[in-house]
Image (spheres, rainbow, N blue to C red):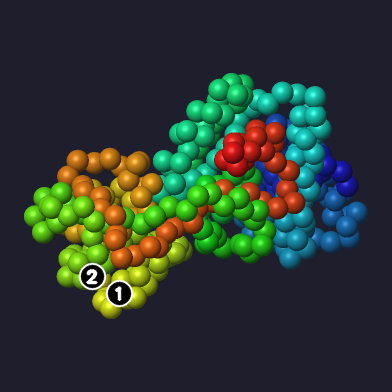
């Protein structure tokens, strides 16, 4: 069995029909059927349940699919790594970032682009869970996110470069007269205000940090809204609906009028940030140089 046959098998597994797989591979159906038969004869297993309209993987087929995807990825990465030995830094660098870390990227990208103008960027946004999945699928190489990284996979599979910590600040409607003369705020002053919090089904780290700090100061915040969107929460603050606590760098990405940001005088809690990538996996030259700039 060779790389070509593995590609054929994966196409059939993805399409669920030999006819559709042959079309996707730009080949005729009979040769593809013969190749599948050769693979099954070589392995002495049945890879697909053919009883229904759509081909379904057997247990053996599912195992081969997982292994084949990994082998093809490794094969592709090996080719790319060998090509890069004598090539300059160029191509596309795919990065994922949580919304609350977007403001960290522009100065790094500016510096990177000055040094390596042959590289273009593809940047995607999502929560920890979604970005972790994209990293595993290799649709992105690097992630910039709050720490700890709350993905579905084992945290030991990631390499992490910690970045400077980010202090939390109170984010309030500018129209609230209660805090109009304040240059800083105490946690207890948020006790009775309507509170907004950032929380998703999969990632709760920031929410828990803020809730625990409130409890440490002797109160349970009056949460009136939970949202997975930073933009929605800040828009609600600007509309006078409630207040929130965010890392300071978040506000650089959402400079909305109607929002007032105050340091918290009696709570020295900060949010850790880092850039992550998969351990023991190939990193392009572009990705390695991007990490180096963050390290400077």
The mark that comes first in sequence, 2 or 1, is 2
Residue 210 lies, with reference to residue 140, above or below; the image says: below
Q: Which mark is on residue 217? A: 1
Q: Is residue 121 visible?
A: yes
Q: Residues within 10 Å of mark 1 (few under 14, many from 20)?
A: some
Residue located farthest toward the bottom when viewing the structure as drawn: 218
Up-down: is 224 above or below 37? below
In the picture, measured across the screen, residue 69 lies left or right of residue 107, that is right
Q: Does residue 134 show up?
A: no
Residue 150, percent across and down?
52, 62
The local secondary structure at tag 1 comes to loop
| Residue 17 percent location from the top left of the image | 66, 48
- Marks 2/1 in contact by CB < 8 Å: the verdict is yes
Q: Farthest residue in the right direction? A: 42
Which residue matches tag 2? 188
Compared across the picture, whether 176 is left or right of 74 comes to left
Q: Secondary structure at mark 2?
A: helix
x 43%, y 52%: residue: 166
Q: Nearer the viewer, residue 153 or 205?
A: 205
User: Image height check: is 61 above or below 33?
Assistant: below
Give the residue drawn at x 74%, y 65%: 59
């Amino acid at each position: 069995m060779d790389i070509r046959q593995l590609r054929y098998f994966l196409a059939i597994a993805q399409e669920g029909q030999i006819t559709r797989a042959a079309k996707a591979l730009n080949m005729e159906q009979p040769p593809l059927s013969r190749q599948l038969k050769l693979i099954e004869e070589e392995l002495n297993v049945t890879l697909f349940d053919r009883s229904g309209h759509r081909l379904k993987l057997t247990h053996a087929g599912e195992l081969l699919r997982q292994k084949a995807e990994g082998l093809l990825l490794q094969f592709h990465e090996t080719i790319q790594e060998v090509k890069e030995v004598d090539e300059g830094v160029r191509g596309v660098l795919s990065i994922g970032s949580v919304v609350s870390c977007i403001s960290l990227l522009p100065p790094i990208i500016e510096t990177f682009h000055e040094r390596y103008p042959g590289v273009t960027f593809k940047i995607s946004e999502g929560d920890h869970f979604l970005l972790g999945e994209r990293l595993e699928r290799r649709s992105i190489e690097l992630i910039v996110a709050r720490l700890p990284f709350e993905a579905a996979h084992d945290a030991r599979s990631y390499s992490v470069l910690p970045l400077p910590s980010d202090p939390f600040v109170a984010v309030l409607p500018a129209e609230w007269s209660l805090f109009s003369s304040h240059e800083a705020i105490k946690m207890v002053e948020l006790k009775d205000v309507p509170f907004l919090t950032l929380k998703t089904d999969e990632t709760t780290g920031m929410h828990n940090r803020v809730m625990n700090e409130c409890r440490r100061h002797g109160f349970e915040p009056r949460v009136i809204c939970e949202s997975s969107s930073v933009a929605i929460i800040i828009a609600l603050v600007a509309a006078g609906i409630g207040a929130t606590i965010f890392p300071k760098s978040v506000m650089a990405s959402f400079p909305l009028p109607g929002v007032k940001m105050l340091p918290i005088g009696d709570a020295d809690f900060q949010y850790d940030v880092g850039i992550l990538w998969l351990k023991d996996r190939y990193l392009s030259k572009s990705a390695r140089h991007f990490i180096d700039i963050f390290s400077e």
